Image (cartoon, rainbow, N blue to C red):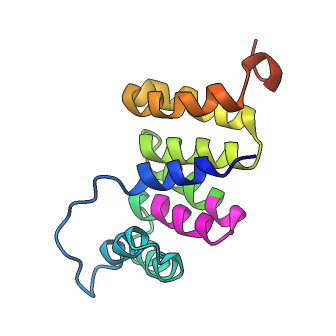
Amino acid sequence: MPRFPALVLLTFAVAGFSQAPATKDDPLALGLERISAGDYKDAKLLLERAVKQEPRNAKAWMNLGIARGKLGDEKGRFEAYQRALEIDPNYAQAHFNLAVAYLLVGKKCDATAEAAALERLDAELFEKLGWLTRITCDPLGCGCGP
């Protein structure tokens, strides 16, 4: 399977981070900076500290999923995205990232379910995912359509 969805995932995941410079006491902000810089190892460590400090921070969990995924930890990626969605079931970006992650590992039906949730929450973000699902998952060929 082509690797372009991973690039799309990262592009949408970190797009729009225009916050104040991070301080050493803010592991989430530092982790986001490290993701933006492509330093996923340090990002993962910082974001693990962030979720330890704030276990109900969906944004920290979602970005931890990005870092884990970029380091090849698929199980950790899914756990982090799912934790983000347990905390905030309406977190559109987490649904998007989870859908792309499912596509990356060939779980098209799971990706379709996440896409349906995303469509209800954020039509614009759904459209960005839509072209991926159209080229990777024919609803009749997935076995997950009616």
On screen, 91 above or below 17?
above
Residue drawn at 57 percent across, 61 percent down? 80
On screen, 71 above or below 92?
below
Q: Which residues are magenta?
A: 61-77
Q: Nearer the viewer, residue 51 or 137?
A: 137
Specify the quadrant that holds the C terminus.
top right
Would you say 9 lies left or right of 11 here? right
Q: Main secondary structure of the magenta part?
A: helix
Would you say 141 lies left or right of 124 here? right
Q: Position of residue 141 (x, y in %)?
A: 82, 21
Task: Tell me if residue 137 can be seen.
Answer: yes
Q: Nearer the viewer, residue 50 or 44?
A: 44
Residue 108 on the magenta segment? no
Q: Nearer the viewer, residue 58 or 146?
A: 146
Q: Position of residue 102 (x, y in %)?
A: 68, 45
Q: Nearer the viewer, residue 135 or 122?
A: 135
Q: Position of residue 86 (x, y in %)?
A: 53, 49
